[in-house]
DNA sequence: TATCTAAGTGAACAGTCGTATACATACTTT
DNA sequence: AAAGTATGTATACGACTGTTCACTTAGATA
């Protein structure tokens, strides 16, 4: 038991500055900086360690980038979980999705901003990691959609098609919501309404869809 | 007349290296680099002039960024013009839009990639310029939509809502098409089909829409 | 022809960058 | 108590950065 506790404490300590590096990096990227414009020295200066100390936690900046992707997607997946647990009607579900989205954006601004900006950003390794994760999310969404009663007879290709459309719409709206001033509740509400309308409009077309298109 | 021609020639010459700076910058940003990761010296090295020569054409990198935004949006607006001239049925119009999109993407890869990546990129001045342009495009699109017969009684807010949804969907699909390998015609065709399906699905919902949502 | 100007050059500046290397320290394990 | 390991420090290196200043030159204007 002393073995386990001491070892875990050591690991916990190691995780400390490692986590601070991650958090500070996300915070710095939330402002006017992109990942490949972020320098190692700049980051370590902010964290309060000497530049070479960085290498105790990551072999290079690419490795940090991958850690940031992991961190950022943890929050995004929680939205899907929230929605999955919601068994109400489609109409209420749309409202629920948007509210869940806004809640998680508020709680994890920096993570969402990171995904948004680095999805097409300059670092190839980060960009590819984000896309892989988004593809996974899209697949998860398609599986969830397959469970809905009025989508039961849709084929897989069409499910993926609608999943990508829904996901694209939500990501675009999320980014717009990110940009509105934190205290501008009115502007935020307007964007939430628009996001709901986008989802509703898409879902309105679903019953009319014929698969041979 | 000699005054006009000589003056215009001088301006044309000035525009030469200025345009080369713009083109090379776009080309370099098409690869694994973001705008705020692009250095002045790197760019001038590529162009073949000495670093200080840059200042003969732009006061700083921000000014270059704005020029890049101008350049990139010139192509995007042509898509709208193409569509505007197309007076065929909705069904054919969708196919036409997607084809026009792909054609312009092929002709102006770098410009589209620039818009996509710097829309949420690190440079605030570039980011804001892109958003302003996109907002203008969205308004133009809303105006065009207002002319369609079955959208005649829609109010302005709803028109903007659907315009933003359509624009978001197209931008997202454009970016995916950008990423597929240039010679992968099969993959490109699949993405074109999906883009068409997205548009069709959205338009299917339109007649069902009730404005009080 | 003489003058003016846009465009490009070259040297120099004070910084910042990533990283290698060697050393210090605190905590675990044996 | 001894040895080992994870973490952080100090120094140093060559390379690259944006920008300054003074200089050249080719072409347009007067």
Image (cartoon, coloured by chain):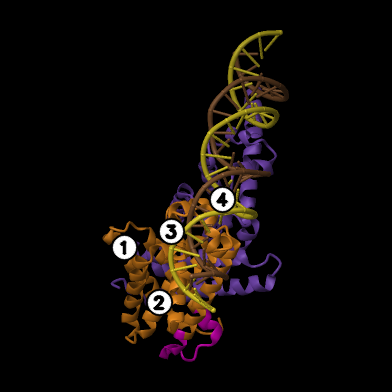
Chain colours: A purple, B orange, C brown, D yellow
Report crowding for label 1: few under 14, some 14 to 19, many 20 or more residues within 10 A (C-alpha): some
Does the segment drawn in magenta span residue B146? yes
Disc 2 and disc 1 in contact, CB within 8 angstroms = no
Quadrant location, the N terminus of chain B? bottom left
The residue under label 2 is B78
Query: Mark 1: which secondary structure?
Result: helix
Residue B188 is marked as 1
Disc 3 and disc 4 in contact, CB within 8 angstroms = no
Query: Mark 3: which secondary structure?
Result: helix
Left or right: D5 as drawn, with respect to A119 = right
Report crowding for label 2: few under 14, some 14 to 19, many 20 or more residues within 10 A (C-alpha): some
- Where in the figure is residue B11, as x and y percent of width and height? 47, 72
The residue under label 4 is A37
Determine which quarter of the picture holds residue B202.
bottom left
Circles 3 and 4 on the same chain? no
Q: Nearer the viewer, mark 4 or mark 1?
A: 4
- Where in the figure is residue A145, as x and y percent of width and height? 43, 63
Circles 2 and 3 on the same chain? yes
Residue B49, visible in the rendered structure: yes
**Inter-mark Cα distance, 4 to 2:** 32 Å
Query: Mark 4: which secondary structure?
Result: helix
- Where in the figure is residue B185, as x and y percent of width and height? 27, 61
Does the segment drawn in magenta span residue A210? no
- Where in the figure is residue B176, as x and y percent of width and height? 40, 61
Disc 4 and disc 1 in contact, CB within 8 angstroms = no
Marked residue chain, label 1 = B
The residue under label 3 is B24
Q: In this rendering, is residue A142 above or below B212?
A: above
Name the residue located 37 percent from the left edge and 77 percent from the top edge: A208
Nearer the N terminus, badge 2 or badge 1? 2
Q: In this rendering, is residue B96 above or below A126?
A: below
Q: Which residues are magenta?
A: B144-162
């Amino acid at each position: 038991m002393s073995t386990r506790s001491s070892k875990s404490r050591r690991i916990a300590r190691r995780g400390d500055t490692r986590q601070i590096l991650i958090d500070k990096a996300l915070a710095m990227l939330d402002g006017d900086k992109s990942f490949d414009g972020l320098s190692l020295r700049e980051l370590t200066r902010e964290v309060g360690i000497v530049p070479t100390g960085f290498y105790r936690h990551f072999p290079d900046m690419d490795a940090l980038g991958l850690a940031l992707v992991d961190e950022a997607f943890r929050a995004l997946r929680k939205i899907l979980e929230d929605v999955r647990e919601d068994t109400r009607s489609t109409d209420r579900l749309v409202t629920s999705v948007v509210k869940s989205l806004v809640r998680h954006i508020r709680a994890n601004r920096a993570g969402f901003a990171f995904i948004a900006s680095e999805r097409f950003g300059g670092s190839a390794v980060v960009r590819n990691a984000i896309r892989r994760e988004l593809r996974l999310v899209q697949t998860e969404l398609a599986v969830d959609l397959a469970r809905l009663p009025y989508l039961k007879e849709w084929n897989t290709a069409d499910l993926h098609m609608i999943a990508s459309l829904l996901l694209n719409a939500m990501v675009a709206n999320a980014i717009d919501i990110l940009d509105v001033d934190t205290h501008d509740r009115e502007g935020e509400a307007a964007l939430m309404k628009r996001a709901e309308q986008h989802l509703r409009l898409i879902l309105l077309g679903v019953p009319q869809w014929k698969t041979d298109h």
